[in-house]
Amino acid sequence: MSANRKKLRNRHKDASNGPFPENTSSVSSAPEALWQEIHNAHKPEAAPIRAWTRGVAFDENARRQVFNVAGMPFVFKWLAIMPDVHAGKGATIGSVIPTRGAIIPAAVGVDIGCGMMAVRTSLTADDLPDSLKAIRSVIEKAVPHGRTHGGRRNDRGAWNDVPAEVGRLWQSQLHSDFQRIQERHPELGNPNHVNHLGTLGTGNHFIEMCLDESDRVWFMLHSGSRGVGNRIGTYFIELARKDMRTHLADLPDRDLAYLKEGTAHFDDYVFAVEWAQKYAMLNRSMMMERLLNAIATARLLPEFDARLEAVNCHHNYVARERHYGEEVLITRKGAVRAGAGQLGIIPGSMGARSFIVRGRGNPVSFESCSHGAGRMMSRGEAKRRFSLEDHLKATAGVECRKDNGVIDETPAAYKPIDKVMAAQSDLVEIIHTLRQVICVKG
């Protein structure tokens, strides 16, 4: 084995993170409860907050947002706050919001159905070449990524010519229900929605090739409902504000405008958001299928099987679920469903470990866990604080973009993933630990 290949096999054992922990899939006993209860002393009638934030930052901006949501009259039981908590628009990212009789569109947000997909292959580190640049190039050519420009020429973030399989998927799975949405709300119509199906996007969306604790190769990606989800989210956030225009002044934040169950706009929103969540799930599946086919066709690697293990989960969404004997609406804003035995994905940042987890079904968290590490600072602050040299050091050994355009995604802009995982060990158990060797960003 060459020195370079040995280096590749050991990339996941860098000095900053140490060696992989033991695989915990055989652990059956649940650890102690790690949540802490927080109350708003200025509003004692508000719902309590149960937070999994031991050893991780929970800044004042995020805390203030959480208190605002907890004061809404339709919150069921309590809010559950995950260890990746950080301030977001309208509602805090890393929060689980159970409600009865109403829904807050801004809490779901505009990246409806955003989530993760991971697939384990039969490949191992020994099958990989010393240089991974060619594989990264194949992935980048197979899946459009980056900013979109309305489908115009040289639009690298969307399809200029929609592939046949993408068109068939749109027609068979998405077209008819979207027509129903468009008939009710013509403002949501856009001929470019199909051009985004099977594309990555930008920001913190990514595609990675990873090695697990046994040097097996995984492919993992992060994306959502793309432009159409953004359009649906933005439209209904504004619609909720219009519906509440005489009461907006009574809300602690105008982004907490809500839709009441039993109204036409509530029903329309639920239908549209469920459609967007389906779009997001199919979007991830299409990207994964295309990149796996492209890698197999390129013949840069031995023949492989990619049907061994697969996980596809949302972490920005709303669903009707039963908790504590009642049917409620659960909004997971940057949180993953972690029912007993249910598999999920918790990614770290560029250069950090990621985890395939099995849910413990903890009822106090409404069977949820974090969706990632969580930002330590805003994108603007990260760009001001870190240099390109900092980013190069943090991503050493990973085949990825190393330019000023991704400094806001550098690992130090995020919370330490190991502390996040320790804070929620009563919510999930780790069954696979992944470390990326290729990372594609938009």
Image (cartoon, rainbow, N blue to C red):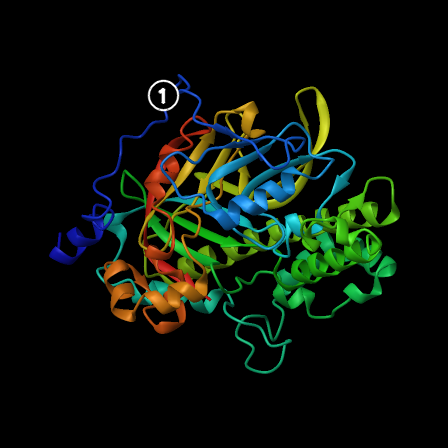
- The percent coordinates of residue 275 (x first, y second) are 72, 50
Relative to 142, is 301 above or below?
above
Q: Residue at x 67, y 65 (%)?
A: 194
Q: Is residue 262 left or right of residue 370?
A: right
Residue 334 is at least partly visible in this image: no
Q: Image check: 267 left or right of 167?
A: right
Which percent across, then down, holds residue 49?
A: 56, 32
At horizontal 48% and vertical 41% (from top left) the residue drawn is 310
Task: Find the residue positioned furthest to the front.
Answer: 42
Q: How many marks?
A: 1
> Dot 1 corresponds to which residue?
27
Residue 388 figure quarter: bottom left
Q: Position of residue 273 (x, y in %)?
A: 71, 49
Judge whether 36 appears above or below 436 on screen: above
Residue displayed at 66% across by 21% down? 324
Amino acid at pointer 1 = Val
Is disc 1 placed on a helix, strand or loop? Answer: loop
Q: Horizontal and vertical percent for residue 167? A: 67, 63
